[in-house]
Image (cartoon, helix red, strand yellow):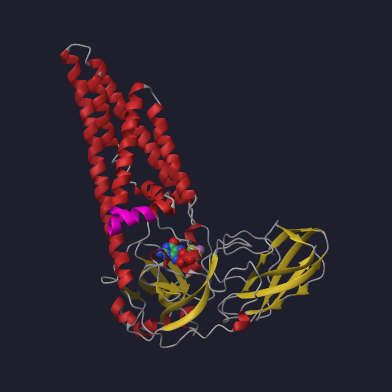
């Protein structure tokens, strides 16, 4: 019996590392560590802080696993409970992060369930062995063999998973180290300065230029692709006179253009926040296409990411003179890894799913009739021009405000067309024109504001924008699929005395 407990510990030791390959849980726990503890760790271990933290985490997990092993051996589900609590901690940690995606939430759950099943399985083998020990020696041998096989299997899985994780971690480290070495070139064409009148200056509004850390992130990548800029090449192929290859160094040497451009996701609901405005630095895609020379009949550029994701962009949009960029910089920094380092596309006027390929490695000049982009067979429209829209940011929906002059503010956008006017209405009354701030350019969102005299009561506010082509925002409510939501952003305000 005593030796069984010792073996329980041993087995738990095997089971514990099988948690660590799925580092998502570990990472979430690290993130959940209060800043004070992190500072303390940095002070204590200096630059070795991450290694020390990881080693500490491994120790904690080994201890937890040992505990789970012992408990599970004594009583069924007791160990599983420890695993479940650990998984829950991971889940909560993930949820408290700024960008809690479904993917991120699934990982700790999957890890905990896998750990629980593995734990149960190994304990069963161990218990078979333990009870066989009371029988004649001939009965004991197969039970022992089964247990040892199970341990060996778990061990092999652990080593393999660990190695894979290690390789991926290594690549990610190479990419972030390489990113820190990138010096962005001085733009040949600077972004026009932001006019002071571009800010509506209403308390509580989003910044006119979205900081990188707050920029929405949408992609299908489970793990952020780690691309080494030293080996990155962009290949232009397909219906071209001559195929072209471009290295990162060659790209950085091109005359760069710097522009503010607001990009948006087709999955952005009316009033949603899947939209952001950044100062991008890049080389116009049309220059690269001109080097390759698209042949007659081509009408689409299928851009491909290193992870195989694709977007189909109308060729004419990339050549009509707008600032469609092969971007390397975002708000004065190299692209953050999660926003496409080292190179991505940014195309004013089109939703991201048909234009904004991150970690881009290929441009195939082709025809819509011949090639299909990633989202097209998945229920999304082949073409995705951004729909003119607007949003109320202040006051926040459902928040109480004080009676009197209530300042209402928000944004409106119609990339590459520009906004002409923004109007508000209260309780479906007459439309009242808001004060439209100056745009940074036609390719960015515009801020607006309107002061409303509101006595105590409940109100419904609605906003609508009209673009410079004279098209008013579509009133009819439509879902995001297949080509972008429509309808008026509608909020409720509770005006208190
Ligand atoms: N490689 C790759 N690029 C991608 C995507 C993707 O899934 N994979 N998603 C696109 C979508 S749908 C949008 S809205 C934008 C979002 O860019 P961001 O994450 O930098 O905000 O990236 C686009 N580029
Ligand atoms: Mo998107």
Residue 246 visible in the displayed image: no
Residue 251 is left or right of residue 322, and the answer is: left
Q: Residue 233: give x, y in percent of width and height.
A: 29, 73
Q: Quadrant of residue 398?
A: bottom right
- Asked if the magenta segment contains residue 43, the reply would be yes
Q: Residue at x 39, y 31 (%)?
A: 80
Q: Residue 10: give x, y in percent of width and height.
A: 24, 31
Vertical position of residue 146 compared to residue 97: above or below: above
Magenta: main secondary structure: helix
Q: Residue at x 33, y 78 (%)?
A: 183
- Asked if the magenta segment contains residue 183, the reply would be no
Q: Residue at x 67, y 66 (%)?
A: 392
Residue 216 visible in the displayed image: yes
Residue 126 is left or right of residue 483, and the answer is: left
Q: Residue 209: give x, y in percent of width and height.
A: 53, 73
Of the pair 186 and 473, the residue shown nearer to us:
186
Residue 20 is left or right of residue 441, and the answer is: left
Q: Quadrant of residue 144?
A: top left
Q: Residue 466: give x, y in percent of width and height.
A: 69, 76
Of the pair 164 and 237, the residue shown nearer to us:
164
Residue 241 is left or right of residue 138, and the answer is: right
Q: What is the magenta range?
A: 39-51
- In the picture, the quarter occupied by the C terminus is bottom right
Q: Of all residues shown, which one is farthest toward the bottom?
A: 188
For the image, the number of numbered tags is 0
Q: Quadrant of residue 471?
A: bottom right
- In the picture, the quarter occupied by the N terminus is top left
């Amino acid at each position: 019996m005593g030796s069984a407990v010792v073996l329980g510990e041993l087995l738990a030791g095997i089971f514990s590392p099988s948690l660590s390959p799925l580092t998502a849980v570990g990472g979430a726990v690290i993130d959940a560590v209060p800043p004070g503890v992190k500072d303390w760790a940095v002070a204590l271990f200096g630059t070795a802080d991450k290694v020390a933290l990881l080693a500490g985490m491994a120790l904690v997990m080994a201890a937890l696993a040992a505990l789970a092993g012992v408990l599970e051996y004594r009583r069924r589900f007791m160990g599983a409970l420890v695993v479940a609590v650990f998984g829950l901690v991971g889940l909560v940690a993930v949820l408290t992060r700024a960008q809690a995606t479904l993917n991120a939430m699934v990982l700790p759950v999957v890890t905990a369930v896998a750990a629980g099943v593995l734990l149960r399985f190994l304990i069963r083998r161990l218990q078979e062995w333990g009870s066989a020990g009371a029988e004649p020696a001939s009965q004991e041998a197969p039970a022992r063999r089964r247990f040892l096989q199970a341990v060996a299997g778990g061990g092999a899985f652990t080593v393999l998973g660990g190695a894979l994780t290690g390789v991926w971690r290594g690549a990610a480290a190479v990419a972030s180290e390489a990113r820190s070495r990138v010096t962005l070139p001085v733009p040949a064409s600077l972004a026009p300065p932001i006019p002071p009148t571009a800010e509506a200056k209403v308390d509580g509004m989003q910044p006119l230029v979205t900081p990188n850390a707050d920029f929405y992130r949408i992609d299908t990548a489970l793990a952020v692709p780690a691309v080494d800029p030293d080996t990155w090449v962009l290949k232009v192929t397909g219906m071209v006179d001559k195929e072209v290859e471009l290295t990162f160094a060659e790209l950085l040497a091109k005359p760069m253009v710097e522009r503010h451009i607001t990009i948006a996701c087709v999955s952005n609901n009316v009033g949603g926040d899947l939209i952001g405005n950044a100062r991008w630095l890049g080389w116009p895609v049309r220059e690269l296409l001109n080097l390759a020379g698209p042949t007659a009949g081509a009408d689409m550029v299928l851009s491909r990411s290193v992870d195989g994701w694709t977007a189909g962009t109308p060729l004419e949009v990339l050549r009509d003179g707008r600032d469609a960029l092969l971007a390397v910089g975002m708000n004065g920094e190299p692209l953050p890894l999660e926003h496409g380092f080292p190179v991505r596309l940014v195309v004013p006027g089109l939703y991201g799913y048909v234009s904004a390929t991150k970690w881009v490695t290929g441009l195939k000049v082709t025809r819509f009739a011949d090639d299909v982009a990633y989202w097209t067979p998945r229920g999304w429209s082949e073409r995705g021009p951004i729909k003119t829209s607007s949003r109320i940011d202040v006051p926040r929906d459902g928040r109480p405000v004080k009676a009197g002059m209530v300042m209402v503010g928000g944004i409106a956008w119609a990339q590459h067309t520009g906004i002409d006017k923004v109007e508000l209405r209260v309780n479906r009354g007459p439309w009242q024109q808001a004060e439209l701030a100056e745009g940074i350019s036609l390719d960015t969102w515009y801020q607006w504001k309107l002061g409303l005299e509101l006595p105590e009561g409940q109100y419904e506010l609605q906003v609508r924008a009209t673009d410079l082509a004279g098209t008013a925002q579509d009133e009819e409510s439509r879902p995001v699929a297949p080509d972008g939501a429509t309808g008026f952003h509608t909020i409720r305000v509770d005006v208190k005395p």
